[in-house]
Amino acid sequence: MTVSSDPWWRSAVVYQVYPRSFADGSGDGVGDLAGLRERLPYLAALGVDAIWINPWYVSPQADGGYDVADYRAIDPDFGTLAEAETLITEAHGLGVKIILDIVPNHTSDQHPWFRAALAAAPGSAERGRYVFRPGRGRGGAEPPTNWRSSFSGSAWTRVTEPDGTPGEWYLHLFTPEQPDLNWQDPGVVQEFEEILRFWFDRGVDGFRIDVAHGLVKDQQFPDLPADLEPTTAPPYEHRHPAWDQDGVHEIYRRWRRLCDSYAEPRILISEAWVFDPERLARYTRADELHQTFNFNFLMAPWEAAAMRKIIDDTLRAFAAVGAPATWVLSNHDMIRHLTRYGRPPGQELAQVGTVPVDLELGTRRARAAALLLLALPGGAYVYQGDELGLWEIEDIPNERLRDPIWQRSGHQRRGRDGCRVPLPWSGSEPPFGFSSGDPWLPQPQSWRSLTAEAQTGDPASMLTLYREALRLRRDHPALGDGTLTWLPAPPDVLAFSRDPGFTCILNQSSDPIDLPSHTDLLLSSSPLPNATTLPPDHAAWLRTS
Ligand code: GLC
């Protein structure tokens, strides 16, 4: 097959590295590039095709690096540009591609552009790069619209003008330290194309686009429709004047042309919180992005009918635009799936620390979910620690919490630190080989049995399950890109076949079921009691010819 008819990304398994929490080579308790470089062989042995690295750029870290002050330099916490270049070369040497994270919706308030905007006058070209508007009401004392920040509070902050008077307001859909850029400004458009090129020229294979559905705002700046106003969380979709506006697609068409101009075309994946499958699939039309995250699947309850509907809707919508689906269970923003699946039904997505969790049940289901994830048609994303069976840490002491959501919500929402706790690599005590210093977030003693070292070679471990599943996926012609056919199955059971000769079955009912006819058991999420039975919360991969 030619490269263009079978590009690598259509079937790829991408491993997400949250660099602050992956591995610390310098001993300051913060993960870094030195640590990541040391662990590249681990990732190659795991069998992933690529890694996606969360933002590693110079940043005051008001939001875990999603507040970028210099897009062309590495944050000193993480290392240097020279180290980044070496890392790219080393990863390629091991057959692992590198995907970076681009943050085009907003910069840091410490970015030279924003500092210049604050120093300049209303109406200036410097302010034109951001979204500055006069306030409403007497003396402009009210925000320009009623939009809310995703992290609580108004999405607008008022500035003091250089002459000391209260002045305009600027938009920040996230923290005030993350001012939104104005994508109507040609200079902004040009700058990001140059940033993409800067990294592509250093061998980077692609980008994950942060808040990809947010770049273009309705230029009328209307208030939210009345029924959306109280909502601070998705689903907002395109009814919100800042989300999923049609204008974003023009940006991605330009970026796609840039990607395709390289001899080895680069790829783009969007983080777009868009829940209507047809609207989401628009991001992956043939002349736009390659992939987009499927958050409907990530947020689905442990329930066969709900999952099957999402799988069907996804496959239909993406097939219509000729794009592969992607599947993901966890990331650095969401409660780890092992914990979600161990919570009482209906409470899977409740705030951290508010509902009980059965970790044994969650682990059993997470094992089964891994086999579902890796058997579905298309690409898959694995968040660091999924392969170790890590759960959400819900009891981080308040004074150690770092996520801006904790402060911004007036200590109502604990935020996302619980899925960002540094990985346990080895040994029997924190910091478990993550660092020689004190990790930036505390690790629980209970992770002692989950270190990569403890799990390596243990046939019953989550790590062995992932390694085995990834090996089979790589070798089996039915897996990766393609289609599936649902098989008749009892209620609460997902069973589908893929050609040639492969069946995946997941039992989400509370009773054991009979395995469908097969020639071999390729892999089961846990050992089966006998050759014909699949217990509840188990999954199996079968050879059928
Ligand atoms: C994305 C990131 C998240 C960040 C936000 C603002 O949702 O995944 O971590 O806080 O964008 O950049």
Image: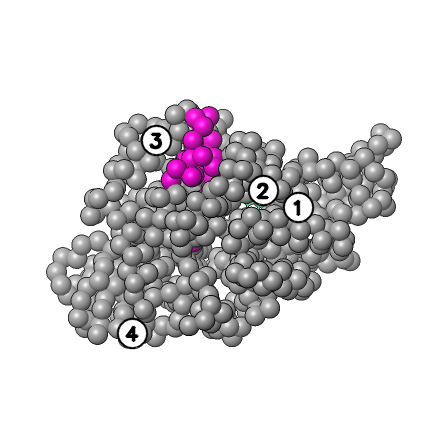
What is the distance, in whole Å, between disc 4 and disc 3 at their CAs?
A: 43 Å
Examine the rendered structure and indicate whether residue 423 appears above or below residue 96: above
Circles 4 and 1: CB atoms closer than 8 Å: no
Which amino acid is tagged 1? His
Q: Position of residue 134 (x, y in %)?
A: 82, 45
Compare marks 1 and 3 and give the one earlier in the sequence: 1
Q: Is mark 2 within 8 Å of ligand 1?
A: yes
Residue at mark 1: 106
The residue labelled by disc 2 is 66
Rendered residue at 47%/37% (across/down): 33
170 above or below 527?
above
From the image, tell me which residue sits under label 3: 433
Q: CA distance from mark 2 to mark 4?
A: 43 Å
Q: Which residues are magenta?
A: 14-39
Which of the marked residues, 2 or 3, is nearer the chain's N terminus? 2
Residue 500's label in the rendered image is: 4
